[in-house]
Amino acid sequence: MKKVVVYSTKEYDIKSFEGFGSKEFQFDFIQEPLDLDTVHYAKGAFAVCIFVNDQATEDVIKELATLGVKGIAIRATGIDQTDIKAAHSYGIHVANVPDYSPYSVAEHTVMLLLSMNRHVIKANARARQFNFSIEGLTGFDVHSKTIGIIGLGKIGAITAKILTGFGAKLIGFDPMPNDNITKATGLEFVPLDELFAKSDIIILQAPLNKNTKYLIQRSSIEKMKKGVMIINTSRGGLIHTQEALDGIKSGKIGFLGMDVYEKEKGVFFFDYSRNPPADPVLQELLSREEVLVTSHMAFLTSNALQDIITTTHKNLSSWNKGEAAPFEL
């Protein structure tokens, strides 16, 4: 059995991998993320398996090649943590998991929308103290609101389908407009500036790349409606967090829902309850009633975990046979 080192592992990862029962690979689980300080754990490994906040930079990849690693299996859709060009230059294969229950992220997105709108966290906190006052908990009907979705891949398309049930007006932006989404949901593709100007709620479900970095920043926020709700369930780097915080303080942004954060590496997925990170922006966000933060968990359903393990194993198995992986990058 060939050795595969799985970085950034949690208990749910271990249960999923061990439950799969591979006869081809021995999985060694490392809690720490992959970086220059932890790359040595990959000695003797056929491949490494990494997640969203690992650091497969050129320097790390060079060390992996020196250690004899033949593949990097990304157990996620996002590939911004990996220098794919460098991997190829060192003869290392790279593959990802492009599809894993897109319903998980879409449903989490709608949960954030409804929880913020109807002040669920605040209401529950009151109820736990036997305070059943409803003062200050007024929401709004999602019906008839204009919702703009940025990024209409599989997750964005499913989010649009879910939201059709609310009777909202759907508009969207994507570099590759899809007529099938329009036919299925009535969503109208519009230019980005028009989406900013017309949307009551803006949902981010786009990948992080040079075109989407800081898509939400001061200049784009100025184009939005006063009191706009913004939800990000894609990548933290799509939002310039300090400028979004400024927008919250001014009242321009009425609600901010974040499952991701631009400086989440080394923070999200860990318990810092006894020693909070020294990040004043994150601390202020968490102190505000207009903000709802979850710790990069939109993907976390049993269905998605099963899909991730199955696809990752297919990628690894193909490399083991000397073939290209089904989802080779």
Image: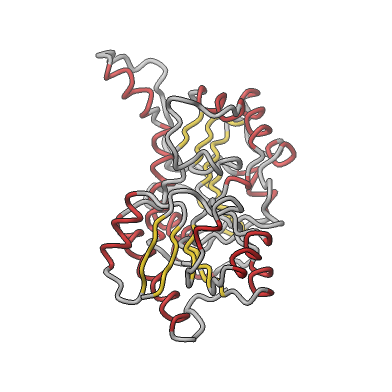
Q: Position of residue 100 (x, y in %)?
A: 40, 63
* Residue found farthest to the bottom: 322
Q: Quadrant of residue 217?
A: top right
- Quadrant showing the C terminus: bottom right
Q: Position of residue 236 (x, y in %)?
A: 58, 45
Horizontal side, residue 209 vs residue 155: left or right? right
Asked if one can make out residue 294 in the rendered structure from this viewpoint, the answer is yes
What residue appears at the point 64 percent right and 70 percent down from the top-left corner? 87
What residue appears at the point 41 percent right and 60 percent down from the top-left corner? 102
Q: Position of residue 44 (x, y in %)?
A: 48, 69
Tell me if residue 120 comes above or below residue 21 in the rendering.
Answer: above
Asked if one can make out residue 182 in the rendered structure from this viewpoint, the answer is no
- Quadrant showing the N terminus: bottom left
In the depicted view, which residue is nearer to us: 102 or 62? 62
Q: Position of residue 216 (x, y in %)?
A: 66, 43
In the depicted view, which residue is nearer to us: 93 or 309? 93
What residue appears at the point 57 percent right and 24 percent down from the top-left corner? 284
Q: How is the image coloured?
A: secondary structure
Horizontal side, residue 87 vs residue 23: left or right? right
Tell me if residue 25 comes above or below residue 138 in the rendering.
Answer: below
Q: How many numbered callouts? A: 0
Q: Quadrant of residue 57?
A: bottom right
What residue appears at the point 52 percent right and 63 percent down from the top-left corner? 153
Tell me if residue 9 comes above or below residue 62 in the rendering.
Answer: above
Horizontal side, residue 288 vs residue 15: left or right? right
